[in-house]
Image: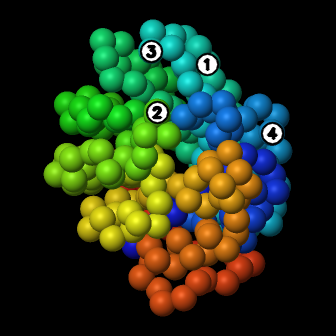
Amino acid sequence: MIAVLASVRDLAEAREAAAAGADLVDLKEPSAGALGALALQDIAAITMDIRSRWHRQLVSATVGDFDAHDHAGRCAMARDVAACGVDFVKVGIAPGAHAAAALAHLAALRLPSVVIVFLADGGIDLRLAEQAALLGFAGLMVDTADKPSGSLLAHADPDALRAFVMLARRHGRLCGIAGSLGFDDVTLLRQLAPDYAGFRGALCDGDRRGRLDPARVRRLCALLRGEGGATGDRPGKTSSPAPRSG
């Protein structure tokens, strides 16, 4: 079963996403870039609130967008976000000359919660993904930097995406696919079968900067789980993938 990652921008949306069935509540500010970060105090406060209501709810947070060569700033923010108590710290890596060095700096932190997010608008670098998998990060994702350009699945090679998912699984890492995904992408997502599929715009009224709609979260969860109807609000947490060993 594909778990649903729902990106939320504040406490109200985080509560709505958790209540509507999102497997992973992802803290992110959509107006601040592809992986825009919330303030650290907000990440900590939202995480504590959600955990007090849904004890098994998984929470992730992004560290923000950094220049490709700003390894020190990226690593410092990763440490600070991890200290907020989230389950996963999402760190974006753009392709290019600095990518391998960025991975090495992040690996040196020895943070077990880091998920590397490859910005793959121009394609997926499987060699770089292999390097990240060997360095022992908790998970690997692909996403897009240019959200208005459309869904990642409309531009990326399905064979490369399938190879990415298989690579992550071969190394025992969680894998995720995101990037302006919508309801029309559900069929291909179910064929690719990543651990997580990430959504923001498809869950909102209007574009990704609009307000989250819990009914859309419920509907998307139902579709990815192969259920006939929408799921209802629930007081607890449904099961979702846990990090694999290795």
Task: Tell me the CA gap for discs 3 and 1.
Answer: 14 Å
The answer to whether residue 131 shows anywhere in this view is: no
Residue shown at 50% from the left, 23% from the top: 109
Task: Tell me the CA gap for discs 2 and 1.
Answer: 22 Å
Label 2 sits on residue: 145
Label 4 sits on residue: 42
Q: In which image quadrant can residue 57 be found?
A: bottom right
Badge 3 amino acid: Ala
Task: Tell me the CA gap for discs 4 and 1.
Answer: 17 Å
As displayed, is residue 89 above or below residue 191? Answer: above
- Is residue 188 found left or right of 241 in the rendered image? left
Badge 4 amino acid: Asp
Q: Secondary structure under badge 1? A: helix
Q: Which label's residue is closer to the chain start, 3 or 1?
A: 3
Label 1 sits on residue: 76
Q: Nearer the viewer, mark 3 or mark 1?
A: 3
As displayed, is residue 172 above or below residue 42? Answer: below
Q: Secondary structure under badge 3? A: loop
Q: Are marks 3 and 1 in contact (CB under 8 Å)?
A: no
